[in-house]
Image (cartoon, rainbow, N blue to C red):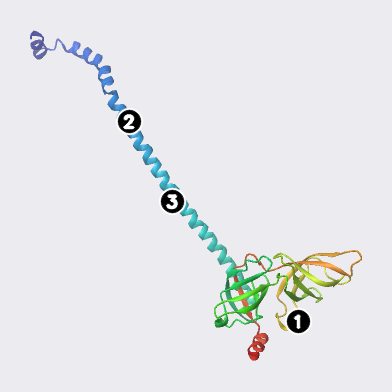
Amino acid sequence: MALLLIDRYTEWLEPVKSELGELAVPFYWLTDLPARLNESAQDGLRSRDELQQENAALRGELLVLKRKLQQMASLAAENVRLRQLLNSADLIEDRVLVAELIGVSPDPQSHVVVVNKGVSDGVYVGQPLLDANGLMGQVVSVTPSSSRVMLITDPTHALPVQVNRNGVRAIAEGVGDLYKLKLRHVSGTVDIRAGDLLVSSGLGSRFPVGYPVAEVSSVTMQPGQPFADVIAVPRAQLNRSRHVLLVFDRETERATRQGE
């Protein structure tokens, strides 16, 4: 009781209280440690969960952005191809129709594709098909809304061509390879060499004259053989072109319609 009165009305015990307070700090810290550890653990768990959720959301956004980027790259490439195609159309005097490939023959030996234009668009059998680089093939059958086109590399297809450099004529045959044509019966004395451009000759009244067909890649003369092996690479991108041109040759179109 006396200590209480002294503490209340005097300051004699202040130094002792201060020392005792300093000594008690570690005990307070130790008694509060479990609560603080528990709070820190909960904060850590919350932060971990939040980071995981944020990472998952960012991964999802990244996938979406990558998909959009792929679409943009595809659209940009398609725009380039369409500009090339339209530039090619400007160089063609005949009337043209832009078409799109919608199907490919499942038979690897049958180089036939389907385009989304048919009789209702004026398409006719024998009509030439081109891409931005060269001649691709000809229409072999039509329906009201689509057409089947045989490519120049089909094993049953043959095309009259001429060397653009000197006018030498030959027949380019398909061999079932999208990257190869073979010239039939070319004498070893004929002036034809690697790098020569082959264009349609117009003979046979099937293809108009002057369209790029292929580029000669090799000329080989086998000993004892009367003809040279001449291999050419098609100018058209037969395995990649999606948008193509159907060419309305005036004379062929007129003759076809008169015969109907």
Q: Quadrant of residue 157?
A: bottom right
Whether label 3 touches label 1, CB < 8 Å: no
Q: How crowded is mark 1: few (under 14 residues within 10 Å), some or many (20 or more)?
A: some
Name the residue tied to disc 3. Answer: 61
**Left or right: 72 with respect to 38?**
right
The answer to whether 49 is drawn above or below residue 113 in the figure is above
- Whether residue 132 is visible, yes or no, is no
Q: How far apart are the two marked residues, 2 and 3, measured between alpha carbons?
A: 31 Å
For the residue marked with disc 3, what is the amino acid?
Glu
Observer-nearest residue: 55 or 259?
A: 259
Name the residue tied to disc 1. Answer: 203
**Measuring 54% from the left and 59% from the top, which residue is drawn there?**
73
Helix, strand or loop status at disc 3: helix
Quadrant, the N terminus: top left
Q: Residues within 10 Å of mark 2 (few under 14, many from 20)?
A: few
**For marks 2 and 3 on the same chain, the one whose residue lies earlier in the sequence:** 2
**Measuring 67% from the left and 69% from the top, which residue is drawn there?**
111
**Measuring 55% from the left and 66% from the top, which residue is drawn there?**
79
Name the residue tied to disc 2. Answer: 40
For the residue marked with disc 2, what is the amino acid?
Ser
